[in-house]
Amino acid sequence: MFRCPSTTLPISRFPLASLCASLAAPLFTCAALGVAAVSFAVSAPALAQDQPVVSAPSAATVPSAGSAGSAAIDGSMASGTTLRTDDGQLNGPSGASDAKARGAEGATGEAPGNGFDARQADLNHRTEENNYNYAVDEHNCYSKFLVNYCLNKARDRMRTVQAGIRKEQLALDEEQRTARAQQRDQQAALQRAQDEANAPQRAAQDASNQQQYEDKQRQHQLDQAQRAAEAPQRAANEQSYQQKVQQHALDQAQRGVSPSQAAANQQAYDQKQANFQTQLEQAREQGAQKAQERVEKQQSFQRKQETAAQHQQDVAARQKQAADKAQQKQQEQLQQQQQLEQQQKQQQQQQ
């Protein structure tokens, strides 16, 4: 695309040079038009080979030599090989490749739910291309005589293409919503089937938990009753201990042990008892911690077993679905082959 000559009067200190430049501008424009026409003529066969059906402009629409401004615009658009999509044409090499990709997708009969990203990328590309074409047309319109008319036509073309893209975008969004809804329904059905399959196991687990809870409650009641029955024995033991302490104090007094020595002995005894209690508490804490670790390990093992069983069920379900799809596809291929054979037989009979 060449730069259009300026439409404003040049301001120069050399009027003669400015006049020569203004007279030489149409000559350069004609030369650029010739080069653009040659490039378009060279690239037209290649474009015709890529696209089987392309509506080319008729000879009646070629601008005359008198309309230099419109010829310049048409030449600039021809040099860029930009063909309108709203006129049933393609926009340059990129449009041809996009048309090939869309044709290949339509020929392969791609199922709904596949190729959403590719279709969205194609719509985005077409939108950007439409905006770019409109910007080019808007820029080129300012070099024409009927500027507003040219801008209105360019805007109408842009809006027509935009409406088509918008329609396809809405259809694509609806297909995506439908595919997501189907996927959610399938997941919900699988979850319901899984819950129904795990219902007996959950019922058995709940019954086992209830039985364990009732056993613990009965054991607790038995422990409480046994402790209440042992209360008199504990009181007697406490009384006997107090008597022994008193007797020990009397024995020390008779042996002549001083109160300070007795206090020191008592302090040493209390320290030993405190150390023993500390060791006993530590042993209990370690035992409780080890018991908790064993419970956690057992729960982790149970979770791993459940996860492995669920994974095995999922794999079996996916394998079954894949086998069903393969069988269905094979049946469809057999039907298509039979139809083709019948058509060939009919053609042979007609011949």
Image: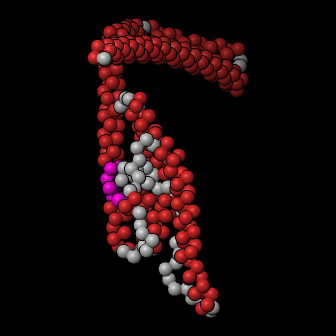
Left or right: 306, with 159 as reference point: right
Residue 226 visible: yes
For the N terminus, the image quarter is bottom right
Coloration mode? secondary structure
x%, y% of residue 218?
A: 35, 8
| Corner quadrant of residue 191 | top left
Q: Which residues are magenta?
A: 157-166
Left or right: 319, with 168 as reference point: right
In the image, residue 161 sits, relative to residue 249, either above or below, namely below
x%, y% of residue 214?
A: 34, 10
Q: Nearer the viewer, residue 193 or 79?
A: 79
For the C terminus, the image quarter is top left
x%, y% of residue 111?
A: 37, 29
Q: Nearer the viewer, residue 164 or 47?
A: 47
Q: Is residue 212 magenta?
A: no
Q: Main secondary structure of the magenta part?
A: helix
Residue appearing at x 63%, y 19% in the figure = 279
Residue appearing at x 39%, y 56% in the figure = 57
Left or right: 104, with 163 as reference point: right
x%, y% of residue 114?
A: 41, 32
Left or right: 87, with 77 as reference point: left
| Corner quadrant of residue 71 | bottom left
Q: How many numbered badges does the structure rendering display?
A: 0
Q: Nearer the viewer, residue 85 or 187?
A: 85
